[in-house]
Image: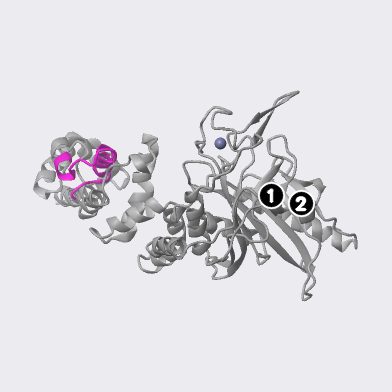
Amino acid sequence: MDEFDIVIGLEVHVQLKTKSKIFCSCSTEFESPPNTNICPVCCGYPGVLPVFNQKALELGVRVARGLGCEINPQIYFERKSYFYPDLPKNYQISQYKMPLGENGWLTLPSGKRIGIGRVHLEEDAGKLVHKKDYSLVDLNRTGIPLLEIVSKPDINSADEAFDYLTYLKLALQYIEASDCDMEKGILRCDANISLKKKGTQALGVKVELKNMNSFRGVRDALDYEAKRQAKTLEKSEKITQETRLWDETKRKTMVMRSKEEAHDYRYFPEPDLRKFSISLECKKIQENFLSKIEMPLKKREKFTKMYGLSAKDTDVLISDMWLANFFEEATTTFSDYKKMCGWLLGPFLEQVNALGASSGEVKISPANFAKVVKYFAEGKLNNLAAKKVLSLCVSTNKDIDRVIEEEGLVQVSGHQELQRFIEEALSQNPKPVQEYLGGKQQAIQFLVGQVMRKTQGKANPKVVRELLEESLKKHKGESSE
Ligand SMILES: [Zn+2]
């Protein structure tokens, strides 16, 4: 393996976030029953004409510019001919010679830039549902607007491919161009990989990989394939140019077909759609939108440097733009960043998950959340009480102070008040007191529990313990006198 350099290129298809399809007005709704979002255009009836969806174009321009691509001055669609049972026209409207954008890049957390060769618009095909001895066709997906993003062969390891996909997905989500949900097929990835002898320029024979259903799957498939190719080359055998499928259960790649060439597709300009150019205004609007967004990598740098958060916590925060923004807003009212992050990723997310709520249903404001954490830090609320307040406010955003008062949750931390409970606990439990005085340190735990019960859980256990230790010391002094 050490003799070779790994060369990887990734081809990502993402569904653009539009309400209707790319060449007709059918809905892009994911959950619809089969063959309900269809019309003569997306079903490829003879004589129909496609009408290009402006929103798809705008989002395409946004992504292309967001990835630093140059927008081509004149753009047109081409027909890519092939037959599939779920492609009723027998061709796909795509872009070939003149894609929407070219020559961009994506920066990885390591600082390495991965070149983006091209970004182009196309329509999706339908879906085949395979049954035991027959197959069904669902055309809801035909005509769904896709953007194909093709990286340059700049990726040199399976881990780098994983990082590229992670940050590409985040970028697309942050700029609101796609939901990038892999489970729904909104983001799909094919890879190509070849090996070349270290220090040489000539690229090896490329193998294309398909059928990876997760970023982890992509990483595993690439890892497997790199090793397979190295073994083959070490035996002085030749690599065949072919397409291979990743088998998740067998954890290996298998031959699917020999690779087709571009000329097999008989590309030619789509006669039903005009050539067009992107107006300056359109570009400006999208660039203006992009300028207001802090991209994931920038946020990552800020969270670790400015807020001093760990890389692990930062990665969780930035994996959801909503969560990252919530955190940042909360820090404007209370500046113990680490404590805030701990409460956000811990009790807060627990509550959200328990509600089964998505971020959209969480009603608590960042300022109110920060208040709960602040009260906890100041000792006004103990851990249990703070969690209770959170649970009462997460989906309502009630006034925190009022909830604390209504529920009687203020922590009992006045020493005098506590002292009364402590004396009670000591006189009611002579046995553990004797045990403790006799040297059994852990007996104090029982006494702490008793005091906590008397305060109905409203005391700070740490303070209780300290006061108990003090009182017990006095008892010891008295008994030895
Ligand atoms: Zn349609």
User: Residue 338 appears in which quarter of the rendering?
Assistant: bottom left
* SS label for mark 2: loop
**Three-letter code, disc 1:** Arg
Q: Position of residue 270 (x, y in %)?
A: 66, 50
The verdict on residue 384 being magenta is yes
The residue sitting at 31% across, 55% down in the picture is 340
**Three-letter code, disc 2:** Arg
- Going from the N terminus, do you reach mark 1 or mark 2 first? 1
Say which residue label 1 marks: 79
Q: Is residue 302 left or right of residue 199?
A: left
The residue sitting at 51% across, 32% down in the picture is 31
Q: Main secondary structure of the magenta part?
A: helix
Q: Which mark is residue 456?
A: none
Which range is magenta?
380-403
The verdict on residue 396 being magenta is yes
Q: Which mark is residue 266?
A: 2
Q: CB atoms at circles 1 and 2 under 8 Å apart?
A: yes
- Please state which of residues 269 and 14 is positioned toward the viewer in this rendering: 269
Write down which quadrant ligand 1 falls in: top right
* SS label for mark 1: strand
Residue farthest toward the right in the current orientation of the protein? 236
